[in-house]
Amino acid sequence: MAVSSIDPAEVERFSRIAAEWWDPKGKFAPLHKFNPVRLAFIRDQALYRFGRDPKARRPFEGLRLLDIGCGGGLLSEPMTRLGFAVTGVDASERNIATAATHAAEQGLEIDYRASTAEALLEAGEPPFDVILNMEVIEHVADPGEYLRACARLLKPGGLMIVATMNRTLKAFALAKVGAEYVLRWLPAGTHDWSRFLKPAEIRDFLSGEPVEVDGPYGVVFNPLTGRWTESTDTDVNYMMTVVRDAA
Amino acid sequence: MSEGFDADVIIAGAGVAGATLALGLAQGGLKPLLIDPVPFESQLAPTFDGRAWAIAYAAYRQWRALGLAEALDPHAQRIEQILVTDGRTPGAAAAAQTPFFLRFDSDEIADRSDGEPLGYLLENRHVRAAVADALAAAGVEVLAPARVASATFGARCAEVTLADGRVLRAPLVVGAEGRGSIIREQAGIGAIGWDYGQTGVVATVRLERPHEGVAHEYFLPGGPFAILPLTDNRASLVWTESAARGAALKSARPEMFQAHLERRFGDFLGDVQVEGPVFAYPLNLQLAERLAAPRVALLGDAAHGVHPIAGQGLNLGLKGSAALAETLVEAARLGEDIGSEVVLERYAAWRRFDTVMLSAGMDAFVHLFSNDNPLLRLGRGIGMAAVNRIAPARRFFMHEAGGAVGDLPKLLRGEAL
């Protein structure tokens, strides 16, 4: 959806919602705190995978990236600045309009579409070098089907990063009860713990696909510094990498 | 840097904090642009100002990491010891040592800082010359003389309009022009502050006796004074006077000034020869209400002008430079918008605690030590004696004064960006 297809009153409304998405102290504050650690992980993995120059301002020039469940564009925008040609996809029309409005304000060119991974695959979308699958899988109805559709949108040799939450008691205590009911970081009901996935389940979903799965890589929050860091503790938040076999 | 921008970061104010920030950003691969109303060359003249800085060892590490060590080392006087004395009059303190005094010795912390001294005394002109050379070597663009007339802060970029009509654009503008920051005012960030009604007087003298790297701080009823060792057996004298007397001293004839020094410092100083001009600065404290807002960050005295009593003003600014440079370089590496509130809030949070604590501490310090109330005198004396006997407390104060307490930015640990 292009911004030009939206009427001005709508743009005004989406601009306000975008401001909410990008407010570091607003309702997406937890996501903003979490963003640097996942951006760093994506950057490091992609630098390594594609042998790019870590000193370059735009190291990923010439690579196509798909951001699934892009929301307000918290990952799509930084990825565009790092040189990727970004396609941002979200099932919510409202999120797409919000993200497109914000990107236009920033002067960033991002191909935002209200769609899904399955729909892209069906429509014959050309494959991507990198697919970001961040904190989405625990919200979809059929995670196996969904993950396989994503894997098939990867170019041979392409990299997908999956981030989600582990189905452990610790995750239940911290991510569900702690974040939603005690700290009130997230609206109650944001997450359904029974839908959280164990790393082995992700491997199982993809066992029939020509991919190599690595990880899990843990991410933990330090309440003293207020910062997230990479860790060997994968009990709550973790990430995995999926690389499609070269043709 | 994206199209349509003149730089990644426009820094208004090419003072030591602003210029150090520019060096850090350039080292991290960003493009800074410095603007200053004073032509850069005239800031290098010895008469520009006579100040000497007591640079905390962590702040000096930053300059080392930025490649300034070779230029600075020959002019840096190591401070091996700081003696803090509380006396009713200087003469009395000199003749019979008061029982209450503090002694900070670099040997005590040597194991934790690789034999670094407690700090370094450096003359402002040497710092400026070294920074200017480093800026040129790093290819940092400096617009001077150029005056900022106005600034606007938009969704995508900040626009700075110069007095000559030129318009410059960048994702972020840093206000580092000191207390009267135009950038702060244009961003609508208020400042709170108060005046101490006192003047800080600064003079450089040649000493008759060798100083052996010992810095003295004396707390007298009329206000504190310090004898800070410089290279070549000179010292920087810093003390406070009433505003009226400060003004009179500044324009006093040399023999009058010399006579005043002898009265003020008693026989502490021995025979001294005043070198160069005398400088007087009004003492006041000023804090910006916020350190950052979308597309704008404040640094150095524009953010926090503190009483220069323990030489912490510039050190605070340099800690700010290191934290801001690392925050921005790291954000740019991750593809984030370096002028966004999301990113700048990290800098503000990193600096907030330090700034408030230190400013409040300095203020309490001044009021406590500029007072002749006998109860306060006894209280502070006991406090000093206690700190002096408890080695861990003493070491903590030294690390704090050295700027090495807390979550240190890389540059303050001596690491490059």
Image (tube, rainbow, N blue to C red):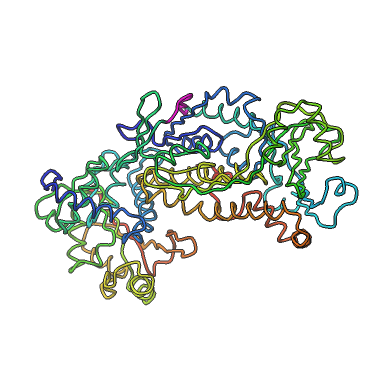
Residue at 14% of width from left, 45% of height from top?
A: A2
Name the foreground residue: B82 vs A147.
Answer: B82
Horizontal side of residue B211 vs B302, given as left or right: right
A240 magenta-colored: no
Question: What is the count of numbered marks?
Answer: 0
Horizontal side of residue A44 vs A197, given as left or right: right
Looking at the image, is A85 positioned above or below residue B6?
below
Residue B197 in the image: state x and y as whole percent: 64, 44
Residue B393 in the image: state x and y as whole percent: 71, 60
Name the foreground residue: A170 vs B290.
Answer: B290
Magenta-highlighted residues: B140-148
| Residue extending farthest front | B244
Name the foreground residue: B169 vs B68.
Answer: B169
Looking at the image, is A188 positioned above or below residue B165?
below
B146 magenta-colored: yes
Residue B271 in the image: state x and y as whole percent: 86, 33
Residue at 24% of width from left, 53% of height from top?
A: A16
Residue B118 in the image: state x and y as whole percent: 70, 46
Q: Quadrant of residue B411?
A: top right
| Residue extending farthest right | B95
Looking at the image, is B154 positioned above or below residue B251?
below
Residue at 10% of width from left, 46% of height from top?
A: A5
Q: Quadrant of residue B46?
A: top right
